[in-house]
DNA sequence: TCCATAACCATACGGCTGTATGGCAACAAG
DNA sequence: CTTGTTGCCATACAGCCGTATGGTTATGGA
């Protein structure tokens, strides 16, 4: 066998270059030549690892959403380990989705660019829909769990509550990106906390 | 003077062509050549009315938001003329922003494409921010008016309520676009109506 | 050592882009 | 009926795009 390379590493490097380019200059800036330059490779090598530009962008999108979901999962795990009430864990998770610092602002920009692309490219639409469904499902599960432990009223519709909370955080993210003033951030946080408090009015009976 | 043409009409026709192209095939489909063909003109004529493609797209964006705001204003005027409570008027206005039929789905697609572009083009960002501010301001005004006539609790923060409602409708629009199932539409409508009922719990004392 | 094979690169190519240019046609004003 | 101006068009052009092609380099196994 000839020399070997770390395929996973290479693809990760190229996806990261795509993310950086989009975060800095938008989706149109992520050309093959620009991605290669940004990643420090030749155009030919990018072609070697991705059959087409579409495939490269799709991989970069999937990597982005996977990273985001992993972060949310980590926050959830930490909250559960720390014995936090579900309301608090969900608040942390949803706040993680807001563009509250430079890093998340960049991530939001990349995410929105791909979501716009998802309106034209079916494969990207699948990724967008799947990601949204997972997030909404996790929130719905949290609400359902809240009923078990007494944080949530039994009459609450978990799916409807999850739809409201995820839609709200999506919209707040857009507003926050347009108006990055600190006052806006605190307002958005207040709205989110208020709605979560409304859905989770009780205390977890396991800790009372 | 030589022969005259209706500048406003021509520009409107070209903006409409841009809208149709984006609604059907995305922002990248709106090339100069495609716009000219779609509008039934030559490329040179499009250049005659718009100094650059950026200017054309910006005009098309402004026209889109102006049309939308005009529709909202019309709904508001009709609701007031019909003696509807503010809660009901706001619900009609916000539902107008949801992609509930083919026409509004197309409009949503165009709007999102421009919003994505607004992340790269400052002039477009100005339009996006201004439009969002106007909508939020109108909702806040509605809440403030609701206090006057008894529909809203005096302790309600109008700006915070407006932020929540506009963010919610934005997020719901995205969810609805991804999942056009009728069940999702009714769920989104239920969430919106529920939140409006929470902000406007009272009845207008002018009609009691 | 040698060599098959994968990693990697430089470059060429056709196609499409936005814009610039030059010219023709039509109509209001004199 | 001219005439100057504007509406309108066809085409040329430079540049960038994604992709195809051919070649060079390096290395794990025989």
Image (tube, coloured by chain):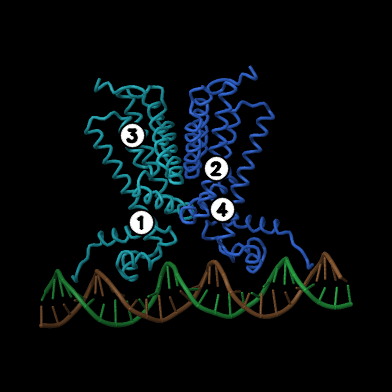
Chain colours: A blue, B cyan, C green, D brown
Discs 3 and 1 lie in a common subunit? yes
- Neighbour class for label 2 at 10 Å: few (<14), some, many (≥20)? many
Placement of B17 over or under B173, stated as above or below:
below
- Neighbour class for label 1 at 10 Å: few (<14), some, many (≥20)? many
Q: How many marks?
A: 4
Residue B19: give its label.
Answer: 1
- For marks 2 and 4, the one nearer the N-term is 4
Discs 2 and 1 lie in a common subunit? no
Residue at image mark 2: A99
Spatial separation of the CA atoms under disc 2 and disc 4: 12 Å
Spatial separation of the CA atoms under disc 4 and disc 1: 26 Å
Q: Chain of mark 1?
A: B
Residue at image mark 4: A23
- Residue at disc 3, secondary structure: helix
Instruction: Depth check: give the residue in front, B165 or A206.
Output: A206
Residue B191: give its label.
Answer: none
């Amino acid at each position: 066998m000839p020399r070997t390379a770390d395929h996973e590493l290479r693809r990760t490097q190229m996806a990261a270059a795509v993310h950086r380019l989009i975060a800095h200059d938008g989706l149109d800036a992520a050309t093959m030549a620009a991605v290669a330059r940004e990643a420090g490779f030749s155009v030919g090598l990018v072609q070697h690892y991705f059959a087409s530009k579409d495939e490269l962008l799709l991989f970069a999108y999937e990597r982005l959403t996977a990273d985001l979901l992993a972060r949310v999962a980590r926050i959830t795990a930490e909250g559960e380990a720390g014995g936090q009430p579900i309301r608090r864990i969900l608040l942390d998770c949803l706040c993680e989705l807001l563009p509250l610092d430079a890093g998340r602002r960049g991530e939001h920009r990349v995410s929105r660019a791909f979501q716009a692309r998802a309106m034209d490219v079916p494969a990207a639409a699948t990724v967008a829909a799947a990601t949204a469904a997972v997030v909404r499902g996790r929130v719905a599960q949290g609400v359902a769990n809240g009923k078990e432990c007494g944080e949530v009223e039994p009459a609450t519709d978990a799916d409807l509550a999850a739809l409201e909370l995820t839609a709200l955080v999506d919209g707040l993210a857009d507003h926050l990106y347009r108006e990055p003033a600190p006052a806006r951030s605190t307002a958005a946080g207040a709205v989110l906390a208020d709605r979560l408090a409304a859905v989770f009015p009780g205390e977890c009976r396991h800790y009372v």
